[in-house]
Image (tube, coloured by chain):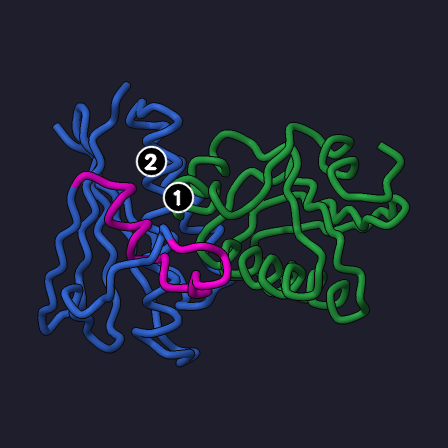
Chain colours: A blue, B green
Amino acid sequence: MGTETRVEVAARVESLATVRAFVENACRRAGADAESCFDLKLAVDEACTNIIEHGYAGRPDGTITVSCDATDDTLRVTILDHGRSFTPGSVAPADVDSDWEDRPVGGLGWHFILNSVDAVDYVPDPAGNRLILTKRSRK
Amino acid sequence: MTEIRIDVVVRGPVEVVVIAGSVDGATAPSLVAAFRQRVGEGRIRIVGDFAGVDYISSAGLRALLETVKEARQRGGDLRLAAVQPDVRRVLDLAGFSGILKLYANVEEAVASFPGTGA
């Protein structure tokens, strides 16, 4: 049996703390370990930041709906927005190896998402863009 | 709304920027402003006291990398002290642990700069 909870926030950076607190509470209720919880918060934060900065591109009236479905050892967060759709394959790989002189500033958000959760699924549909992040808890 | 508190303590030739709270897309601009002010005024030997930082996202890492680049290009540096384990994992994930100089505490970070009497 899974339990699902949901929160809707304005697509503004000021909402990021609310979203992280929502994920934290969902993780706690599911009994997830602290490290998995932190990783999931980071991935959700980065995804929402991308939606705010690129999907809605600063539009003030956008909303983001975050829902969390917890089963025994798996947390699945679905992030729904109505901004510009996104092509995950178009994101250039992050440079995490160059020396400081050559390291570009920025471009790490998608890298964090891919490396903080176990599965990333993106579903653009008429109802909005749906990003599904799945994290298995180590308990 | 995320809260962040930024205080600055002058330690001889070094400025210690004491940060408390979460560094995300909402709060990183305050951190960028604090760092840019120091570097812009030639105060390029900077320690970031991260003992009170419980969270950082890529927005915060942008602030750190920008400051490291600008400080080093002027002969200074931004070095971090007392980075907590969760934040350290984010730095590792970004490959920042090989770029930034990290110290166990503020004393060691301050003493790592020349001219601090260490």
Magenta-tinted stretch: A98-118
- Up-down relation of residue B111 to residue B57 (above or below): above
Which is nearer the eye, B112 or B103? B112
| Disc 2 and disc 1 in contact, CB within 8 angstroms | yes
The amino acid sitting under disc 1 is Phe
Q: Find residue A52 and report its image quarter.
A: bottom left
Residue A117, image x and y in percent? 24, 41
Q: Mark 2: few, some, or many residues within 10 Å (few <14, many ≥20)?
A: many
Q: Magenta span: helix, strand or loop, mainly?
A: loop
**Left or right relative to A3: residue A110:** right
Location of the C terminus of chain B by quadrant is: top right
Which type of secondary structure does the marked residue at label 2 adopt? helix
Residue positioned 17% across, 64% down in the render: A88
Image disc number at residue A11:
none
Please give the chain letter of the residue carrying mark 1: A
Which is nearer the eye, A87 or A130? A87
Which is nearer the eye, A77 or B44? B44
Res B36 seen here: yes
Q: CA distance from mark 2 to mark 1?
A: 6 Å
- Up-down relation of residue B92 to residue B34 (above or below): above
- Up-down relation of residue B108 to residue A100 (above or below): above
Residue A85, image x and y in percent? 19, 74
The amino acid sitting under disc 2 is Ala
Name the residue carrying label 2.
A26
- Count of picture labels: 2
Residues beneath discs 2 and 1 located on the same chain: yes
Residue positioned 47% across, 43% down in the render: B98
Q: Find residue A29 and report its image quarter.
A: top left
Name the residue carrying label 1.
A22
